[in-house]
Image (spheres, rainbow, N blue to C red):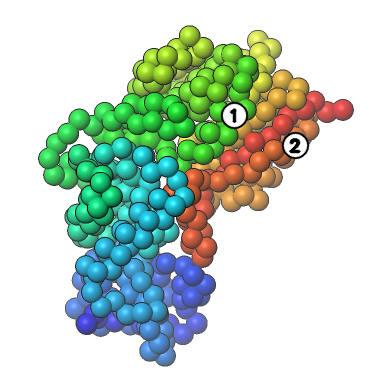
């Protein structure tokens, strides 16, 4: 039914260990007439069937698998099963009022992200093969949700990531179907937010921190809190909602701070929240110089590294903010610190925090190590699906 690609002898080790990708240097031969974006069968050097996926000769990730073991007989049936399975999984594991419904390879739909914000869906397509299928998948998403009594008001595409260039694609942004108001109000952990799905970062809101925000909420009663890289204020709002006496939320983006202020007003929390628009790397030394101290300091920076080549420089950035963050935590207080890059693996992140504590002359006790919300499942064998590290630490003076 589908044309074939054959691997070199000894290749496909990552795939056989549970991975979802085949790289360009692993392929020995392929049938004539295969075009970019086509669905192909993958065979080992001896002809053994390994799976079916879509191919792109422009990408180093030459093939992304849609299925393994059983041959693909009917694409429409497979897509509906993938969408239905993804939604049923979310219903069992998370609050689905707003959640990630499809998380790429971890939901066996490689290269596609779909986030639900109340009655709106935002999709992001990162691979050529899945891009050709995105409208079919959107139709199935709406159908499956409709069966649960959820009528989707609109769908918006945010396929703007630079990785699309590696797939030979241009950015794509806009409505899929009828236009609608792209400022969407959601509620999470009791906190209300205005989410800008058209111009906010990524798909508009970072759903992966949902339950990490809830943990912060529990830690902040009567606390003086500093939230760095606040974006639209999510951690800061959870701290205030959890009973913090005061919260300072800092971010370099005027747009983000404006939305954070609006979210504070939306929750009637503006009396306990202050905002700083500026570079966090410049703010932290100023606060140290003023001898400020906080019961809880939250560090949720953007990814400092998006490739293996820049991990060393990223480690310096993580160390600097964590060292300064620790100096601002009162003795016995709490540091919540994150890394959202999968290239900064947990062991490396631990080493960075350990080095920061040593240079800050602090002792740290781990309260929790957490990762992304279950609607961003980690598929073993696909290391890229494991990316968020979230440490909650008690910071003490050396004794």
- Percent of width and height locating residue 300: 53, 33
The residue drawn where x is 40% and y is 70% is 22
Q: Residue furthest bottom?
A: 46
Quadrant, the N terminus: bottom left
The residue drawn where x is 36% and y is 79% is 70
- Percent of width and height locating residue 268: 42, 14
Quadrant, the C terminus: top right
Question: For this rendering, which residue is in front, 302 or 379?
Answer: 379
Question: For this rendering, which residue is in front, 184 or 356?
Answer: 184
Q: CA distance from mark 2 to mark 1?
A: 18 Å
Q: Earlier in the sequence, mark 2 or mark 1?
A: 1
- Percent of width and height locating residue 227: 54, 24
The residue drawn where x is 38% and y is 43% is 96
Quick check: 201 above or below 268? below
Question: For this rendering, which residue is in front, 220 or 91?
Answer: 91
User: Circle 2 — which element?
Assistant: strand
Quick check: 252 above or below 322? above
Q: As drawn, is 355 to the left or to the right of 38? A: right
Q: Is residue 25 visible?
A: yes
The residue drawn where x is 28% and y is 50% is 148
Question: For this rendering, which residue is in front, 17 or 379?
Answer: 379
User: Circle 1 — which element?
Assistant: helix
Name the residue carrying label 2. Answer: 365
Residue 218, numbered circle: 1
Q: Is residue 319 visible?
A: no
């Amino acid at each position: 039914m589908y044309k074939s690609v054959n691997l070199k002898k000894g290749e496909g080790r990552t795939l056989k260990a549970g991975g979802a990708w085949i790289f360009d240097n692993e392929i020995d031969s392929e049938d004539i007439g295969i075009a970019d974006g086509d669905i192909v069968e993958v065979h080992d050097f001896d002809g053994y069937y390994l799976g079916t996926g879509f191919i792109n000769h422009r990408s180093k990730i030459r093939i992304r698998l849609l299925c393994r073991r059983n041959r693909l007989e009917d694409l429409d049936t497979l897509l509906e099963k993938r969408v239905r399975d993804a939604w049923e999984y979310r219903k069992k594991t998370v609050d689905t009022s707003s959640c990630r419904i499809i998380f790429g390879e971890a939901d066996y739909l490689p290269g596609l992200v779909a986030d639900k914000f109340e009655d709106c869906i935002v999709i992001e397509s990162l691979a050529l093969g899945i891009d050709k299928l995105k409208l079919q998948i959107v139709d199935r998403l709406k159908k499956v949700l409709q069966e649960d009594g959820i009528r989707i008001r609109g769908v918006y595409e945010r396929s703007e990531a630079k990785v699309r260039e590696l797939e030979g694609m241009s950015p794509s942004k806009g409505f899929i179907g009828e236009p609608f108001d792209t400022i969407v109000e959601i509620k999470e952990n009791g906190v209300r937010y205005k989410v800008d799905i058209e111009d906010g970062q990524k798909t508009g809101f970072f759903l992966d921190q949902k339950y990490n925000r809830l943990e912060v909420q529990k830690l902040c009663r009567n606390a003086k809190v500093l939230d760095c890289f606040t974006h639209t204020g999510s951690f800061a709002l959870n701290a205030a909602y959890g009973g913090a006496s005061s919260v300072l939320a800092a971010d370099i983006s005027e747009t983000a701070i404006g939305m954070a202020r609006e979210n504070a007003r939306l929750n009637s929390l503006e009396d306990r929240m202050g905002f700083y628009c500026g570079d966090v790397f410049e703010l932290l030394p100023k606060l140290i110089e003023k001898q400020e101290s906080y019961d809880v300091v939250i560090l949720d920076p953007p990814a400092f590294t998006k490739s293996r080549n820049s991990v060393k420089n990223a480690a310096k950035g993580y160390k600097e903010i964590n060292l300064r963050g620790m100096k601002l935590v009162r003795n016995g207080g709490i540091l919540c610190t994150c890394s959202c890059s999968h290239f900064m693996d947990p062991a490396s992140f631990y080493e960075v925090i350990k080095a920061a504590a040593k240079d800050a002359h602090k002792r740290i006790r781990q309260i929790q190590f957490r990762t992304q919300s279950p609607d961003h499942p980690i598929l073993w064998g696909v290391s890229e699906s494991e990316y968020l590290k979230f440490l909650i630490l008690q910071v003490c003076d050396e004794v």
